[in-house]
Image: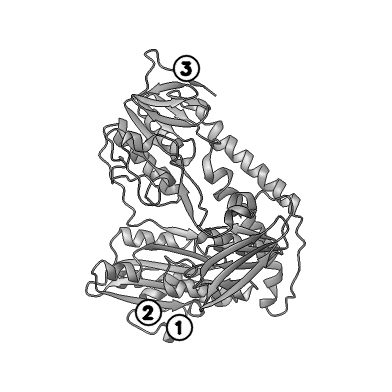
Amino acid sequence: MKDCCDKPEDGTYDLVVIGAGSAGFSAAITAAGGGRRVALIGHGTIGGTCVNVGCVPSKAMIRVAEAVHSGRSAARFPGIGPCEHTVDWPSVQTAKEALVAELRQKKYADLLPTYEGVDYIEEGPARLVEGGVQVGGRVIRAPRIIIATGSRAMIPQIDGIGEVPVLDSTSLLELEERPGSLIFLGGGYIGAELAQMMARMGAEVTLVTRSRLLSGAEPEVSLALKEALVDEGITVLDGLSYRQLSGDEDSVTLTVERGGKNVEITAEKLVLTAGRVANTEDMGLEEAGVELDARGSIRVGDDMQTTVPGIFAAGDVTDRDRFVYMAAYGARLAATNAVLGGQERYDNSTMPWVVFTDPQVAGVGLSEAAARAGGLEVKTSVLTLDNVPRALAARDTRGLIKLVAEAGSGRLLGGQIIAPEGADSIQTLAMALRAGMTAKELGETIFPYLTTVEGLKLAAQTFDMDVAKLSCCAG
């Protein structure tokens, strides 16, 4: 792996990228692929959040939990009895760490030497200074900079939180022993995924949230997920306020106000899953004139440029979508616009998103509320999974599909699905939105029978007919 000893002869680069996660790598290799000289500053563990402490370890352990749960849930099929699997937590952790190390090496460290235009600088934190970026006591000079330093778990303002040992999503996945009971504070996608995972691994779980589960999802979808989690024995408390936290290494008590009354919840550990905050501290951003929003994220335009010409940003550190694929996408745009003469613009209008609970939750485009807030007249279709043959055959009808279309033209505006195989179905709807299809056109499209994705066709037909009256494969 090259270090900065291979710097250009004149001591300057075309581009400095701060952060060696998914966004940073995307920016660096895009610029290098266009013949530019790039200094990639680590500013943390190579690979960033996704491979080290986010997507890879969490989804690997979620899969383990699914395998455990599949044995218990087998009894839904007539003639099949349930099977209880034991969980060897240390072995699960060892396997997860091995996978993380393998992917970090193959997908990041081993790739760098293949890009001759990229010099990797592993030294300490970076700071913007006049003419470039200061790191390790020296200044790396370049006319263009891309900031891709990612995010970390947010610590909510609760009395006593600084005096009680708590976990976040990172430290939870690194525990040497599985706690017997857990409180998850926050009902977004991280809280929902990890709460279900730990419950399936054998922990007693309580999930608390100020509003409702997945507050950005359709209300019907949020309710369906809550029902699924409760059916698995998870206690879900929503519509509340956090009051106080107390405890020690062995036990923690969270006091919440719900319905005008204080309620105390006690468990061995509390996990903070209340969201993420951008890593923007101590980088000299404000001194350089880089504007941050109220949450501390870097404001960027559609070209991924900050409020300072020549300084761009991408990924979780910005005020844009916090998904690893959107981080890589935004970083590619930033590099293209910064040093390759591009004029590309960020477009998330058909961006699919997924929550890896079971049933999975996925969506694309506008929700009903967002469409109405945008001044559109809309019509909606809601199809429960007991109308989808695939779900009936699997004897698992948890979930639904909701589509949103423009009232007059019938043009599809968005949709969400909660289903055991919803994640792999949403891309079809994303493509339909990208093609500008109407609900009628989607309903007339040929879909393979006995698939979850066929539910999109049935949901589209539900705008104009009662699909319960159709025979199998009809229409």
Q: Which colour scheme appears in the figure? A: one colour
The reply to whether the C-beta atoms of the residues labelled 1 and 2 are less than 8 Å apart is no
**Circle 3 — which element?**
helix
The residue that label 2 is drawn on is 462
Give the percent coordinates (x, y) of residue 255: 59, 68
Report, in whole angstroms, how far the alpha carbon at label 1 lies from the one at label 2: 14 Å
Residue marked by disc 1 = 471
Q: Is residue 49 visible?
A: yes
Residue 130 falls in which quadrant of the image? top left
In this rendering, would 220 be left or right of 346? right
> Does label 3 or label 2 sit earlier along the sequence?
3
Residue type of the residue flagged with mark 3: Asp
Q: Residue at x 37, y 71 (%)?
A: 403
Picture coordinates of residue 143, whole percent (x, y): 31, 26
* Image side of residue 2 versus residue 304, left or right: right
State the mark number for residue 204.
none
**Residue at position x 46%, y 31% in the image:** 126
How many residues crowd around disc 3 within 10 Å: few (fewer than 14), some, or many (20 or more)? few
Query: Is 3 in front, or is 361?
Result: 3
Amino acid at circle 1: Ser
Q: Amino acid at mark 2?
A: Thr
Tag in front: 1 or 3? 3
Residue 398 in view in this figure: no
Residue for point 51% across, 57% down:
156
Tell me how far mark 1 sits from mark 3, CA to CA: 69 Å
Dividing the image into 4 quarters, which one contains the C terminus? Answer: bottom left
Residue 472 percent location from the top left of the image: 47, 80
Read off the residue under disc 3.
6
